[in-house]
Image (tube, coloured by chain):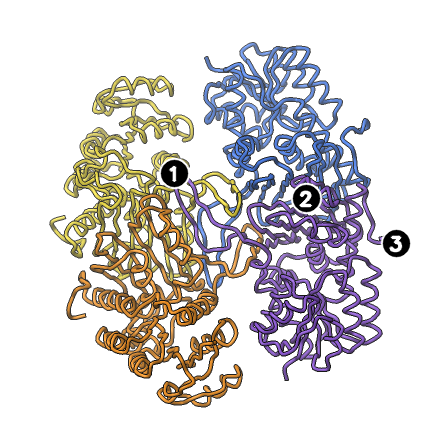
Chain colours: A yellow, B blue, C orange, D purple
Amino acid sequence: MKLNVGLIGLGRLGRVYARDLAAHVTGVRLAALADTNAKLAEEVARELDVPRWYADPIAMLDDPGIDAAIIVSPTDTHTDLAVAALERKKSVFCEKPPALSLSQTQKMKDAAARTHGFLQMGFMRRFDAGYAAAKKKLDDGVIGTAIVFKSSSRDPYRPSLEYANPKSSGGMIMDMGIHDFDLARWYMGEAASVTAIGGTLAYPELNEVGDIDNAIVTITFASGRIGVVDLSRSGIYGYDIFGEILGTTGTLRIGYLRETPLFVMTKNQVAHDTVPFFMERFRDAYPAQLQNFVDNLRDDREPPITIDDAMGSLRIALAATRAQATGKTVSLADATL
Amino acid sequence: MKLNVGLIGLGRLGRVYARDLAAHVTGVRLAALADTNAKLAEEVARELDVPRWYADPIAMLDDPGIDAAIIVSPTDTHTDLAVAALERKKSVFCEKPPALSLSQTQKMKDAAARTHGFLQMGFMRRFDAGYAAAKKKLDDGVIGTAIVFKSSSRDPYRPSLEYANPKSSGGMIMDMGIHDFDLARWYMGEAASVTAIGGTLAYPELNEVGDIDNAIVTITFASGRIGVVDLSRSGIYGYDIFGEILGTTGTLRIGYLRETPLFVMTKNQVAHDTVPFFMERFRDAYPAQLQNFVDNLRDDREPPITIDDAMGSLRIALAATRAQATGKTVSLADATL
Amino acid sequence: MKLNVGLIGLGRLGRVYARDLAAHVTGVRLAALADTNAKLAEEVARELDVPRWYADPIAMLDDPGIDAAIIVSPTDTHTDLAVAALERKKSVFCEKPPALSLSQTQKMKDAAARTHGFLQMGFMRRFDAGYAAAKKKLDDGVIGTAIVFKSSSRDPYRPSLEYANPKSSGGMIMDMGIHDFDLARWYMGEAASVTAIGGTLAYPELNEVGDIDNAIVTITFASGRIGVVDLSRSGIYGYDIFGEILGTTGTLRIGYLRETPLFVMTKNQVAHDTVPFFMERFRDAYPAQLQNFVDNLRDDREPPITIDDAMGSLRIALAATRAQATGKTVSLADATL
Amino acid sequence: MKLNVGLIGLGRLGRVYARDLAAHVTGVRLAALADTNAKLAEEVARELDVPRWYADPIAMLDDPGIDAAIIVSPTDTHTDLAVAALERKKSVFCEKPPALSLSQTQKMKDAAARTHGFLQMGFMRRFDAGYAAAKKKLDDGVIGTAIVFKSSSRDPYRPSLEYANPKSSGGMIMDMGIHDFDLARWYMGEAASVTAIGGTLAYPELNEVGDIDNAIVTITFASGRIGVVDLSRSGIYGYDIFGEILGTTGTLRIGYLRETPLFVMTKNQVAHDTVPFFMERFRDAYPAQLQNFVDNLRDDREPPITIDDAMGSLRIALAATRAQATGKTVSLADATL
C-alpha cells in the first residue's frame, strides 16, 4: 500500500520535493498539492499528474485521501500547519527550521505529544552520502571520541534583501547556520554556550534590512568539547559546504567542491568548476530524506530527526544570533532566548 | 503527448533502464516490457506500473501502443530485434555494441536506411557530465587541436567465465574497449590503424574460455594523430574510468575516483573510498541518454549516435582484438575484419 | 663579502638553522656557534666546519668576527640576548616568539630603537611558498578585499609535559597560535578583540602542567573583519597547517597534506601519507627566511618582520589565552595584557 | 674522510650538480670542475669555492686529488670520458643516457669490467620520493604482482631545434623516454618487444630536424606482462611526470602536478599552478642521487644503477625509436639495434 502524501508549499524547494516525490521516492503517491498561489498549484499538479490541488492548505489537510503532509511552506507558517496536520491525524514531515521562536516550536512539540502523532523534521544534510558516512565512521569508533567539530557553509551569492530580512529569515546565522548546528548536535551532543562574531562585510546593502553576511560561531558543548561554524553569503567561487570532526584517534573531513569530473589544464594552470548551489549539492539528499520519511511511516519507525532536534538547533541559532549582536558569550540555558 | 516506449531485455542494465524510464525520464511512458523470462517481465511490470508485458519481444514490437523500442537484450539479439522494430516503424534505441560482427551491424544500417527509420545507438559515456563537458571544451577550442587521446577503463573484478567468453562478449577488448573506442572517434575522428598487446595476467582461469584480462591498444587516427586505450579487468581498488585529451594549447583530464565526499584521516594516512562499479559511475548518464533519445524523437532531431558511429567503434574493437592476437599492426581498412 | 653570523641555541631548530646556514644559504659564513651545552656546540661546529664555538653566548656576541647573531635559544633568553647583541652592534635575527610578555618584548624594541640596530623576527610561514603566494595574490587584488581569515594548525602528537608547561611555552594558544596570529595580522591588519574556547580534551595528563590541547580563537579585526584560528595538539593523522582568506571576489586556500606523491589503491580504498611534522612542512621556508635575513643585511633593506609585528602577534596570543581562561571577549587594547 | 670529486660538464644540469655537491651532499668535497668553456669553469669554481678547474676534462681526470668523476657532459662524450676515468682508477657517476648506441655503451661496460672500476649510472627518478616509495610498496607486496606498467612524461614546451636534433638527442623517444624505460625495467623486469606510434603533431618545425613531438610506446615484458609509455613535448600546462603500476591486489599511482600549495578560487572556478619543469620536479632527487653515489663509495657498496641497467633502457629506446619509424613490432633481441 502506497502512502498518500500531500505537499504544502511550492516555492523553489517545494517544487523539488514535489518532483522527487513524483519520480524518485518509492512507496508513496503524491496525492495532493497546496499553495496559496492556486495557479502554481494547478500547474505543478498537471505537470506531475497529481490528482488534487488546493489554494488553502487546511483544506488539503482535511482531505481524507491524504495520510501524511509534507510542509515546505514559509517558516512562519510551519507551526500552524504542523499543528493542524497533527490534529487531523496526518503524519508530518516539516522542513527546517521549525519556526523562528522556541515558543512556536514548543507548540509543535506539544501538538505531537498530545496527538501521539508522527512529526519528522527536515535536515537534509544528514542524508547526504558524506555526512551520513561520517556519522557511521564516528559511531563505528574509527576516530575514537569526537572532540572538535568544524563546519563551514558558503552561499555563492547574496540572497535578495527581502529573503535576507531577519524578520522572515531569522538572520543569516539562523538561516544558514541551522544546518551546521544540527550537524553539531548530531555528531557532538548538546551545546552549552556559544560566542559569535560577524558583520556586513561583503554586501553593505544588507544593512538596509539589518542582516550580516559573514559570521563565525564557536560552540562549547555540554561535554566540554568545542566546535566552530563559519558562515558566508559571499562564497563567490561556488556553493561550498564542508566540515571536519577531530577525534582522539583520527579526523573525518567531509565535502567536495568540484561539480564536473573534468580538469582543464592550460598554460601553467589546472582548473575545475565548483558546485553551483545547494540544489546541486544535495540533490540526492533531498529524495533520500523523503524516502526515509515514507519508509519510517510504512515500517512504523520513529522519526530519526525529532522536534527536539529541531528545537536544539534553533536554540543554538538563537543564542549565536544574540551572541553576535551583543559580543557576549551566551549560554544555551538562557531563559530569554 | 508522451512517447510510448517498450523495453526489451530485463537483465541488470535493462532493469536500470526500466526504472529510469519510469521515474527519471520525462515525456515518455513505459508502455510495455519484454523479456524471454516472462515471470521477470511480469514482476518488473508490476513493480513499475507498466501496463503490458511480453515473453516474446516480437509480439511487443507488434503492439500498436508502442512508438519506440529500447533494446537492452543480449548483444547477439540486437540485429534481429532492431531490424524487426524498424520494419514495424518503431523508432529504436539500441544498446552498444550493435553486434559482434560488421556484417550484422550492416544489416541494422540497411534496415534503418530502407525504412527511413530512427536508430539511436547507446554509448552512455557521451552523456556523462565529465565526458560531455570535455567535448564542449574541445569544440570551444579551449585546448586548441586535439592531438593525443588517452582512455583507461578498469573493472573492479573479473566477470563470470560465462560472461567473459569471447563467443558472447567478443572478448575483453570488445566488451570493455568499445566505450573507449567510441570516445576516441567522438573526440578525434576516424581511426586508421591499431596495435594491441595484452594477456591473461591476473586471472589465469580466463584461459579456459580464451579471454584476456589486461590490454593496451594504440590507435593511429586517419589524421596522423595518436591515442592509447588501456583496459583492465583487475582494477581491484574500484571501478575507474578516466582519460585525457592533449591539445596544442592545453589538456583535458576527465574522471573521478572518490564515491563518497569523505576523507578518513588516521595515523599517517588519508584515505577515501572508490567508485564501486559502472552503475554508480554512470547512474546519471543512463537516464540522460534515454532522455536524449526521447527528446530527439519528440523534437524530430537526428540521432546523435548513429549506427555508423557504432560500426566505427566496432571496427576498432575488431581490429584491436586481431592486433592483440597476432602481434601485428592492423589497418581499419582490412577487408577481413 | 660574506656576512659572518653567529648562531645561538642548538636545540632541534637551532641545528636545522646551523645546517641551513652551512649549506643552503648563500652570502653568509657561519662563523661561530654558541650553546650552553659546550659539548654540543663543539660537536656541531666540527660537523659543519664552523671555526669557533662558545658555551657563553655573550662571549660569542663579543667576538669581533661576528656581524650578526641568529637567536634560536629558549624563549626566555631572547630578550637579554637580543638586547646584548644590539648593544654590541650586531644585527639580529630572533626566532619567534620574542618573549612571553609584552614588557620583555618592549625591551627588545627599545634596544633596537636606541642602537639604531637591525632586528628581524622569525616567522617562517611567511616564507613558505603557499603562504607567500597567497600574500602576493591578495596584494594583486585577485580576491578583492580580504574579509574573513581562517587558519588551522595541528600537531601530530602531544609535546612532552615539560615542553607544554605554560611557564616556558606560554601555553598552547601562545606556542602554536603565534604563527597563525602573525598570518592574521599579515593578511588582515591589526586585531581588535578575541574570544577563545578550548580544553584538555585529548590528553588529560596535560592538566598536570596546566595546559590545554585544543582551542578555537576568533578574532575581530580593527576593520570589523573577522577571523578564526583553530589549534590542536591531537592532529594524529599528521602535521596539518592550512588556511583560507575569503575575499569579496574570491577565496585563497593554502595548504597540503600529502608528503609523498604516491597513492596506494587497494580494495575499495585510495590512501596517501601525510606530512610528518613542521620540519618537513617548512623545510624550504626555514632556509628561505635565513636567506632573506642575509640578503636584507647585505642589500641594506629594512627587516620585513619587525619587533612590532612580533609584539602584535604576541598581544593576540596573550589576549586569546586570557579569553580562553576567562570565557570573556578580550580587547587587544586591554592594558593588563 | 671526504670523497674528492671532480665534475665534468657545466651545462644547465651540470651546474645544478655542482651546487648540489657544494651544498646539499655530505661526505664529499667538490675538488675540481671541468668544462671546455674554461671561462665558465672558472666562474662556477669561484662561485662555489672549488679549488681547481680545467678546460680539458682528461687533465682533470689526471688530477691525483680526485677520487671520483661525475660526468654530466654531452651524451656523445660519455663513453670516452667514462672509459678514461675508469682507466685512471677514478670511480664514475655518469648521467643518462650512457651513449646513443649499444656499442658505445658496451665500451663503458667493458672498461668497468677490465678495470674492476665503480660505474654508477644516473637515473634520478629512482631517487624521487614518489617513485622510490612506489618501489618499496611494490617490493613489500602491497599490490601483489605488478602486471601493467604505465608512465607518462610531458615537457611544457618544445626544446630548441638544435637540442631536438636526433643526431645529438637520439630523438624524442630516446631523449624523453629513457627515464620511463628505466622505470619500466626497475618495476617490471626485462622487456621483450615494443611497438610505437607517434608524429610531429604539435610543432611542425621539428620536421626540419627529423624529430617527433608525441609518441606512445607499448612494451611487452619477458614475463608476458605489459606496459605503455606516452611522451609529449607539448605538455603546455606544465611539466608532468606520472605513472601507475597495476598489480594483482592493488595499484600504485605516482605523481603530482601542483607546485605551490595554493588554490585560487574565483567565480565558478578553482585553480592551481603546475610544476614548471624537471629542475623543480626533481630538485630533491638530484642531490639524493649524488648523495647515494657518495655513500656507495664511502660504504663500499655496489652501484644500484649499473651500466647494464642503462644498456637495458637504451635498448628499449632504440627499439621503440625503430618501431615508431617502421610501424612494426620490434623485438629487443633484434641484433641490429
Circle 2 residue:
D214
Residue placed under numbered mark 3 in the picture? D335
User: Where does the image place residue C245, in percent across and percent down from the top left?
Assistant: 34, 52
**Residue B256 to residue C92: above or below:** above
Q: Which chain does the numbered disc 2 sit on?
A: D
* Quarter the N terminus of chain D occupies: bottom right
Residue C13 lies in quadrant: bottom left
Q: Residue at x 24, y 67 (%)?
A: C315
Tell which circle, 2 or 3, labels the residue nearer the N-terminal end: 2
Asked whether disc 2 touches disc 3, contact meaning CB atoms under 8 Å apart, the reply is no
Question: Which residue is at 37% across, 89% downward?
Answer: C59
Rate crowding at label 3 as few (under 14), some (14 to 19) or many (20 or more) other CA atoms within 10 Å. Answer: few
- Residue A217 image offset from top left, x and y in percent: 25, 52
Give whichever of B336, B25 is nearer the camera: B336
Q: Nearer the viewer, residue C156 or C287?
A: C287
Task: Say which mark, if any, is on residue A282.
Answer: 1
Residue C192 location, quadrant: bottom left
Amino acid type assigned to the residue bearing label 2 in the image: Asn
- Is B77 placed above or below A148 here? above
Q: Amino acid at mark 1?
A: Phe
Horizontal placement of A251 versus D18: left or right?
left
Q: Is residue D40 visible?
A: yes
Quick one: SS at disc 1?
A: loop
Q: Position of residue C228 (x, y in %)?
A: 29, 56
